[in-house]
Image: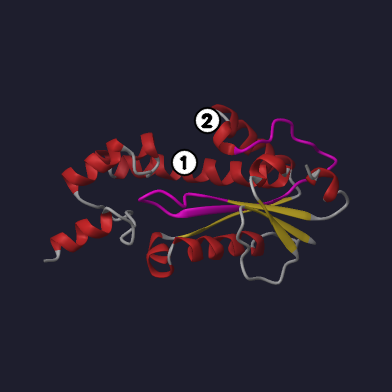
Amino acid sequence: MKSYALSYEGVLLAGVDEVGRGPLAGDVVTAAVILDPSRPISGLADSKKLSEIRRQALSEEIKEKALYWHIARASVEEIDTHNILQATMIAMARAVEGLAVAPEYVAVDGNRMPKWQYTGETVIKGDALVPAISAASILAKVCRDSEMCQFDELYPEYGFSAHKGYGTKQHRAALERHGPCAIHRRSFEPVKSMLADTSR
């Protein structure tokens, strides 16, 4: 297996990841992180594999120790206008462009790279293999989860704090009872069909 840690040694590397491509509600959130080799952070991993408490602690440590970091997003409206893939690419570009210093190389989680001027590569399961991508996944997830908990206070009938907008049985049942709210993605099913039914 390729040793990504060694591959990027001595390079000003930005790791990029997204959170929220699959949910029925809320923005897609991305982050870009350039770690400081002189200030290592132990325990970096795929954010989905970490407990909420551990993610929170690591998020604070990343913000304190990383050389540079930036969190960005694409809105629900942009998702519905461009589709989720293109909106994710837009959000990733915003994350890298928001860094105070341009990276020399960009490693992006997954298999799709935004169309940009940066040199880099995609890394399948990069959030488990490349520490900078792991850090980006943690920042993005902590940010998005926190926002969905705030939306839970605005729209308590949907239970956003429990499922973070994903299409769980609880969430779909709430949609059936109450219909979509302002943060639901109009282009995603079953929201799209529900809106079509009400417009007839």
Quadrant where the N terminus lies? top right
Between 193 and 154, the one lying in front of the other is 193
Image side of residue 151 versus residue 52, left or right = left
Q: Residue at x 47, y 52 (%)?
A: 21
Q: What SS does tag 2 mark?
A: helix
Which of the 4 image quarters holds residue 38?
Answer: top right
The reply to whether discs 2 and 1 touch (Cβ–Cβ < 8 Å) is: yes
Residue 145: assigned label: 1
Q: CA distance from mark 2 to mark 1?
A: 9 Å
Mark 2 neighbour class, 10 Å CA radius: few under 14, some 14 to 19, many 20 or more: some
At label 2, the amino acid type is Glu
Crowding at dot 1, Cα within 10 Å, few <14 / some 14-19 / many 20+, comes out as many
Q: 83 left or right of 121?
A: left
Q: Position of residue 105 (x, y in %)?
A: 77, 60
Number of disc labels:
2
Looking at the image, residue 38 lies above or below residue 14: above
Position of 157 relative to 8 (above/below): above
Which residue has dot 2 on it? 52
Which residue is at a point 66% across and 39% down the rendered structure image? 128
Magenta residues: mostly which secondary structure?
A: loop
Q: Is residue 2 magenta?
A: no
Q: Amino acid at mark 1?
A: Asp
**Residue 28 among those drawn in magenta:** yes
For the record, the magenta segment spans 18-46
Which corner quadrant holds the C terminus?
bottom left
Q: Secondary structure at mark 1?
A: helix
Give percent across and percent down for residue 29: 51, 53
Q: Nearer the viewer, residue 38 or 105?
A: 105
